Every structure is written in structure tokens, then in C-alpha cells.
Amino acid sequence: MYLIEQVEQLNPEVTRMVVRAPQIARKIKPGQFIMLRIDETGERIPLTMSDIDVLSGTVTIVFQVVGATTMRLAQKKPGEYLTDFVGPLGNPTELDNVGKACVIGGGLGVAIAYPLVKWLHSQGSDVDVIVGFRNKDLVILEKELSLSASELIVTTDDGSYGVQGLVTQPLLEKLEEGVKYDLVLAIGPIPMMKAVAKVTKEAGIKTVVSMNPLMIDGTGMCGGCRVKVGDKYMHTCVDGPDFDGHQVDFDDALRRERMYRGFERQSAEHTREVIEASGGNCHCASMASAVRKEA
């Protein structure tokens, strides 16, 4: 059992949770993830590490409520427990010998970008950070990122905060100014990563993207997290989650992502109804049972 020490709402859609897991905290590296299960009746879901505290033995995860399990997870309180919290899984991001980097995050991907920025800064790298959100209310981790970024640029789709437009706009401006990057890291929605990779490919800059497809076991056995890289399919959980952004078939990844959206919406809607019917105080086990019956 894994103790939940802190729960914080970062914005209306995103929650930050600190979980006591000393063994994982000592070993996990930026870019790696964990698989958690709320209780014995729950499904496994992957979440990338957002921060660690080795001294206190805690791992921080940041998640967005998009389906039944994350909806249930957001209902958990400090002092409660998670049944499973397994990791580290996947491969760490290769961040050695990077002089000048640009880390680009979109939406929830900003939470995954944060440990990369923090680690690069600690190693003496010069790190520009560009993050994008739909609007001002959804901006997260701005203060934390500013402590490690050489320059932090925030963009919003509607212009309600920072620079209006897409994250590729400031990137293009930097390149036009003559800034030379050894590495660009992009983490976020598939269309965003595809757009960033297009810009950097034309500029000849090494680019790494972090993929987050459907994942069931995190060991490469289920095959659900396949991603096409070059002329072959690879497993995100064991071969990634990082891949060469100039080799990833983003269109294929987007097609696979869309396959299960209907099921996710149906399950999430039923879970929401269960929560509302119980006044927000339902037990996870009974909620999971209701979701299984619905399915």
C-alpha cells in the first residue's frame, strides 16, 4: 500500500499528487513512469513522474481527469492509500552533454517537461522553455519552471496570458534569431509534437518526443502501446517513452489514440454519475464495481 501524502488541484482539470514510495524515489529518472492501481478492483494506468524527493521518499505525479480511473483518483485524499504504485518503468530521457536545449510542453505535458528542465539546469545546461495552454486558467507549474529555465515563454491559444498562438511560433522566432540548440524536447498532444518536429527537422536539430499511447501492463506484453518509428513498430513502455521526433509516425499514433475515445467517454460519464449520486463520498471499490457492470 502506498500512502498519499498531498493532493493539490493545479487547475480545474489537473491534479498534483504526492505519493510515498521510497524505493521508486531513489531510482526513477526524468522521463520514466509508474503504473498505479487505485485498489484491487481497479485498472492499471501509466503516469510519468513529475518530481521526486529522495530524502522524504516521495514521488509526485500530475494527472488530468480524462477517464473513469483518473476521475476516481482525483477523489482520493491525503492519508488514503493506493494499492499498486510500480516503477520505475520505461527508459530515462538521454540528457547528458547538452549545452543548449529547448524544452517544449503542451497542456499536461508541461508536468512531464518539468523534471527534464530541472535536471538539465542542475547539470549546467542552458535551457529555454516554451509551454502552451488553451487559456490562462489552465496554466500550471509556471513558478517551478521559471526557477530552472534560462527563458520561459508561456503561450495561450486565446491570448488570455503570455503570447497568443502555438508553441511553434516562439520556437521559430528563436531559430530565426540564430539561436543554436543541441536538443529540442517536446512533450504534449500529438499534433503539437508533430508540428514541433516539422520545424526542427527543417532546421536540422535533434528532437526527442515523449509518447503516451494506451498502455495496459507497462511490460511490453500487451502490445497496446505500439508506436510506429521509421519502418517498424516499437513498444512505448519498454522501448520508450522517448523516440526520435523525426522518425515517429504521428498520424498513425493519432489514429490509434482516437480508437478508444468513445469507450473512455462512456466510462467517464458513468463514473461521474456514480460520484454525483453518492454526494462525492462513494468508496472506490463500489464505484469500480458500478463501472464494470456498466461495461
Image (cartoon, rainbow, N blue to C red):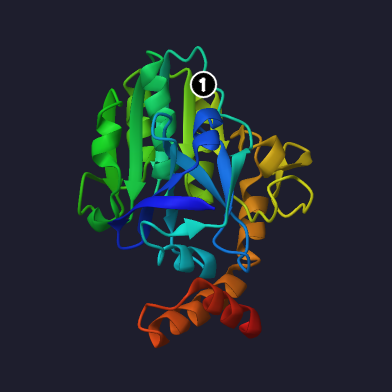
Residue 267 rendering spot, x and y as whole percentages:
56, 76
Residue lying at 46% horizontally and 63% vertically, measured from the top left: 73
Residue 151 rendering spot, x and y as whole percentages:
27, 27
Name the image quarter holding residue 128: top left
Name the image quarter holding residue 138: bottom left
Name the side, left or right, on which 220 lies relative to 290: right
Q: From what the image shows, is residue 98 above or below residue 113?
A: above
In this view, the residue in front, 161 or 3, is 3
In this view, the residue in front, 207 or 81, is 81
Give the residue number, with chain letter if any, for mark 1. Answer: 95
Name the side, left or right, on which 34 lies relative to 119: right
Residue lying at 66% horizontally and 35% vertically, measured from the top left: 247
Residue lying at 72% horizontally and 43% vertically, measured from the top left: 235
Q: From what the image shows, is residue 35 above or below residue 44?
A: above
Q: Secondary structure at mark 1?
A: loop
Name the side, left or right, on which 113 lies relative to 36: left
- Identity of the amino acid at label 1? Leu
Q: What crowding class fits label 1: few (fewer than 14 Cα within 10 Å), some (14-19), or many (20 or more)?
A: some
Residue 234 rendering spot, x and y as whole percentages:
74, 41
In this view, the residue in front, 179 or 2, is 2
Visible residue check, residue 144: yes
Name the image quarter holding residue 14: bottom left
Tag count: 1
- Quadrant location of the C terminus? bottom right
Visible residue check, residue 180: no
Residue 290 rendering spot, x and y as whole percentages:
57, 82
Residue lying at 20% horizontally and 54% vertically, measured from the top left: 160
Residue found at the very far bottom of the displayed protein: 277
In this view, the residue in front, 224 or 270, is 270
